[in-house]
């Protein structure tokens, strides 16, 4: 009797429960795909904002008293050397703060990279980055032809976080992040936790930077331009968090045998392409 009932039950489940499972499965895939689509839109927004930043028409004069002051401050207080890139180099990204731990200073890697890099000014930049890293110093790369002074101040803001000048909590967040890894994969394609930490780090760097600019006596119009540019830059990281959250949920919704494909290809300011 018992065996029969079990058989009967088994029959019912296979006939009724299975189509239901298929239905649920289909709904999960549909919801997941929708999320992935939305994450791709976030990625497109990031790309667009990066284009906006690259073609902002902003620039700054490296010889202005304000910029000289910023450079000095970065070097003396935050152990960070500012190196101008742009003209005559093949460096494609606009700006960055490279901590010593971001840089592979093994002889093998240096040899490989020196063979790869052909342009003299890029070779020089690479040597500076490596030498700084060996001395435990970070390098700030910034393009005066396509950035406002706000981006320079923002990068110094990162150096303040990394050096602990901005406070222990900000230093801890900075220590947890590896710049190159993040830039290679893009904000929507890293674990959500890293994406959130990165957003906080970026916001801290901007706050530091604006405070520094005010302290050094930036003019009102200049400050307006700097803030505008930094707002766009900040938005890219906010969209990164949104994208990463959607990707995470989408992967959870996928059936085990249909794990989410990463359709999203991020084209960031890529440090690895410099090397
Ligand atoms: Zn930044």
Image (cartoon, rainbow, N blue to C red):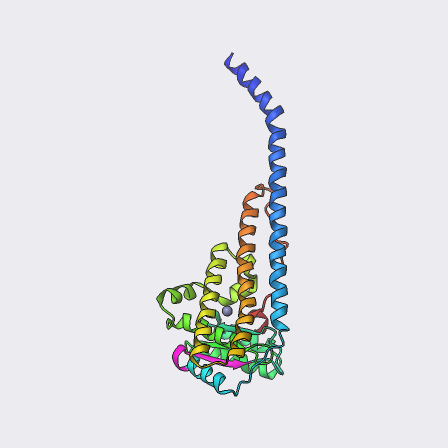
| 189 up-or-down from 158: above or below | above
225 or 93: nearer the eye?
225
| 98 up-or-down from 69: above or below | above
| 24 up-or-down from 186: above or below | above
Q: Residue at x 40, y 82 (%)?
A: 76
Q: Residue at x 54, y 67 (%)?
A: 231
Residue 210: x and y in percent read: 46, 73
Report the span colored magenta: 76-84
Regarding residue 204, the answer to whether it shows in the image is yes
Residue 61: x and y in percent read: 55, 85
Residue 234: x and y in percent read: 53, 65
Left or right: residue 235 compared with residue 138:
right
Q: Residue at x 54, y 76 (%)?
A: 111
Residue 245: x and y in percent read: 53, 52
Image quadrant assignment for residue 253: top right
Regarding residue 112, the answer to whether it shows in the image is no
Is residue 77 rendered magenta in the image? Answer: yes
Is residue 231 rendered magenta in the image? Answer: no
| 60 up-or-down from 253: above or below | below
Residue placed furthest toward the left: 168
Left or right: residue 164 compared with residue 186:
left
Q: Residue at x 63, y 51 (%)?
A: 37
Q: Quadrant of the C terminus?
A: bottom right
Image quadrant assignment for residue 95: bottom right
Left or right: residue 170 compared with residue 50:
left
Residue placed furthest toward the front: 220
């Amino acid at each position: 009797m018992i065996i029969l009932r079990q058989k009967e039950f088994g029959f019912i489940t296979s006939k009724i429960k299975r189509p239901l499972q298929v239905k649920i499965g289909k709904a999960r895939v549909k919801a997941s795909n929708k999320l992935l689509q939305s994450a791709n839109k976030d990625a497109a927004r990031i790309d667009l904002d990066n284009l906006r930043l690259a073609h902002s028409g902003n620039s700054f004069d490296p010889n202005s008293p304000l910029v000289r002051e910023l450079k000095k401050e970065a070097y003396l207080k935050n152990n960070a050397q500012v190196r101008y890139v742009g003209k005559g180099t093949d460096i494609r990204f606009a700006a960055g703060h490279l901590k010593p731990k971001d840089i592979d200073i093994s002889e093998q890697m240096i040899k490989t990279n020196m063979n790869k890099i052909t342009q003299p000014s890029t070779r020089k930049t690479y040597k500076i980055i490596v030498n700084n890293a060996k001395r435990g110093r970070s390098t700030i790369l910034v393009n005066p032809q396509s950035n406002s002074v706000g981006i320079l101040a923002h990068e110094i803001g990162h150096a303040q976080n990394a050096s602990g000048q901005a406070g222990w909590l900000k230093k801890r967040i900075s220590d947890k992040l590896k710049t190159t890894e993040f830039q290679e994969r893009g904000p929507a394609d890293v674990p959500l936790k890293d994406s959130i930490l990165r957003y906080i780090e970026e916001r801290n760097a901007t706050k530091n930077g604006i405070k520094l600019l005010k302290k050094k006596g930036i003019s009102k119009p200049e400050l307006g331009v700097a803030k505008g540019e930094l707002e766009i830059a900040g938005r890219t990281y906010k969209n990164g968090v949104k994208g990463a959250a959607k990707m995470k949920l989408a992967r959870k919704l996928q059936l085990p045998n249909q794990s989410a494909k990463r359709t999203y290809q991020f084209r960031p300011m890529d440090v690895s392409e410099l090397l």
